Amino acid sequence: MGTSSEPLILTAIILAKVAVVLLVFLTSVAYAVWLERKVVAHIQSRWGPYLVGPHGLLQPVADGLKFLFKEDIEPREVDRLIYYLAPFVAFTMAFASIAVIPFGESITILGHKINFEITSLNVGLLFILAVTSLGVYGIALAGWSSNSKFPLFGGLRSSAQMISYELSLGLALVGVVLISGSLNLREIVDQQQGLWNIVRQPLGFLLYISAAIAETNRTPFDLPEAESELVGGFHTEYSSYKFAMFFIAEYANIFTVSCLATLMFFGGWHGPVFGPHLLRAFLPVLWFGLKVFCFVFAYIWIRGTLPRFRYDQLMSFGWKFLLPLALANVLITSFVVAWRAS
């Protein structure tokens, strides 16, 4: 009886993990918008959301309902199939990567070992890089299918920008891969028990976070949706829930690169563990969440502080500064790893 029910139990565990991760992730994305509005308001000495709920805490719920019931306007002469497909591509790719991100140690419940991740891949890092790179198709297709020049310019800018900075972002992580000798995210975290990779790869971290900000189209690299030049860029012709999907995808990508920075450079879920067994099981998840929150807060702080680059400055910074430094970091790390192995 126990053997025949095993597949059902495993399926139930997987479905439960999917439901919990999606609930937490979607809630975090929604309240990241609230946090950004509050933090930037404090930076600029003005009020943020404060009317809907205590301290405006129900503002994300109000915004979600507004997007859901707002009139959906479709411009004439759009390519209907691609116009409607583009936001789904951006949304799906932004959320697919969360499936392989581990956010805590394994626990055992009723004899079943449960990993704090939806699924484990030996090449989890490659999967995340591959999936997030596909997100540019949603933006590029949205700009092209809108049949409007400003969204088209925004889509072209985003394509060139993401291709340029993906090289530096990937190379910034190669140093960590060389040190750990693995593409498995859980193994990379376990390898940092004694010393976090930020100490071993400080240059790699700075290169990664700079490229990650550009990859997520955030200030000061938010040229694809520059309001002063492109009216809003690739999503100018989108409204209602389709615009919300682009908006959610952007913040989901912020959480993804923040999770990856935590796993690759800051020891993942490692931190002080104490207390009874239940507390010791869930404290690593808390440390992981706090580290991710620090990165998200830094994203918001940068948006409220730095001005936008010119497009020529953005491309020059990526190709002439970040890429050579990333290649130099890979070369130096390779020599050090080979020297220690000899």
Image (tube, rainbow, N blue to C red):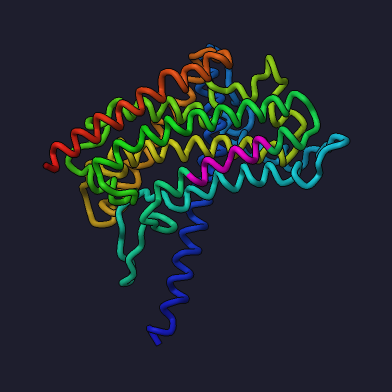
Residue closest to the eye, 159 or 297: 159
Res. 217 in view: yes
What residue lies at 38% left-to-right and 26% top-to-bottom? 207
Q: Which residues are magenta?
A: 130-140
In the image, is residue 9 above or below residue 234?
below
Q: Quadrant of residue 240?
A: top right
Image coordinates of residue 132 in percent, x first then y, are 52, 42
On screen, residue 95 versus residue 112, left or right, reads right
What residue lies at 70% left-to-right and 41% top-to-bottom? 65
Q: Quadrant of residue 118?
A: bottom left
Res. 42 in view: no
In the image, is residue 339 above or below residue 36?
below
Q: Is residue 133 magenta?
A: yes
Rendered-image quadrant of the C terminus: top left
Image coordinates of residue 195 in percent, x first then y, are 19, 37
Q: Main secondary structure of the magenta part?
A: helix
Q: Is residue 260 magenta?
A: no
Image coordinates of residue 256 in percent, x first then y, are 46, 40
Rendered-image quadrant of the N terminus: bottom left
